[in-house]
Image (spheres, grey):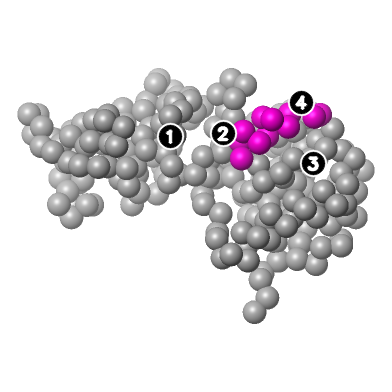
Amino acid sequence: MNAPPLKVLLVDDERLARAELRRLLAAHAQVDIVGEAASAAEAIAQIAKLQPDLLLLDVQMPGGSGFDLLAALDAAPDVIFCTAFDQYALQAFEVSALDYLQKPVQAARLAAALVKVDARVQAAQPAPRKVFIKDGERCWFVALDDIRLLESEGNYARVHFAGQRPLMLRSLNQLEERLPPAQFFRANRRQIVNLAHVASVAPNAADGLDLHLPDASVVEVSRRRAQQFKAITSL
């Protein structure tokens, strides 16, 4: 059985750049170009509507960069950056882009980038759901499975993963609405914990529970939420 086509969205403010990508992609039968966007705002609407598997994404665009676009998404598709500005290369790889292509995009380089996508598809390895976090000049693509804890800091949330603690420009309440409830539990007013990262559970003096994480941190479950936690985890 043939693999389904790879749904690609082209995001670049230059019409000629999008046309050139279309020309190059015409040689790849597995690619289905589902749409184009000329700005970050337009791309956000197109992503919600078209659900692409892959973005070919410019970095510098008027009204919002490619990084700003990713930071506005609840979950990000795979990304291959296409840009004329080589100083963004390191930043792009830090956020786990599949590849980084410098304009003018060469046919061989684009083909090599698509091989990376094909390799994962052929291995039947669906892309994990990821969020994009931009904190100052640093950026990350983070799989939800790797996030162990989210903590409220005013209108922002501090995200704990792999030794990193960046601030995400979303409130804890906003994130709670979008996170899978079977995986992420609102332990108290300030914290949401990934249940997969709970190493042990113990009752505490406040008639609640203490959740011990592998990094030795402890998350307190309020008494009101303790029964909910026990129901979810079958304790």
Q: Earlier in the sequence, mark 2 or mark 3?
A: 3
Instruction: State if disc 2 and disc 1 touch (CB < 8 Å).
Output: yes
Q: Secondary structure at mark 4?
A: helix
* Residue appearing at x 70%, y 66% in the figure: 5
Residue kind at label 3, given as amino acid type: Leu
Q: Are marks 3 and 1 in contact (CB under 8 Å)?
A: no
Task: Give the Cα separation between the discs numbered 2 and 3.
Answer: 19 Å
Do residues under tags 4 and 3 come within 8 Å of each other at their CB atoms?
Answer: no
Residue 12, horizontal then vertical, whole percent: 80, 40
Predominant secondary structure, magenta span: helix
Count the labels in the image: 4
Look at 18% across and 55% down and name the residue there: 234
Residue 125: give x, y in percent of width and height.
55, 60
Q: Which residue is mark 2?
A: 140
Residue 230 covered by magenta stretch: no
Q: Is residue 99 left or right of residue 72?
A: right
Specify which label sits upstream in the sequence, 3 or 1: 3
Distance from Cα at disc 2 to Cα at disc 4? 17 Å
Q: Amino acid at mark 1?
A: Phe
Q: Secondary structure at mark 2?
A: strand
* Residue receiving disc 4: 87
Pick the front one: 62 or 128: 128
Q: Which residue is mark 3?
A: 101
What span is colored magenta in the figure? 85-96
Please give the name of the residue rendered at 44% of the width and 34% of the height, measured from the top-left corner: 162
Mark closer to the chain start, 1 or 2: 2
Q: Badge 2 local density, few (<14 within 10 Å), some, or many (20+)?
A: many
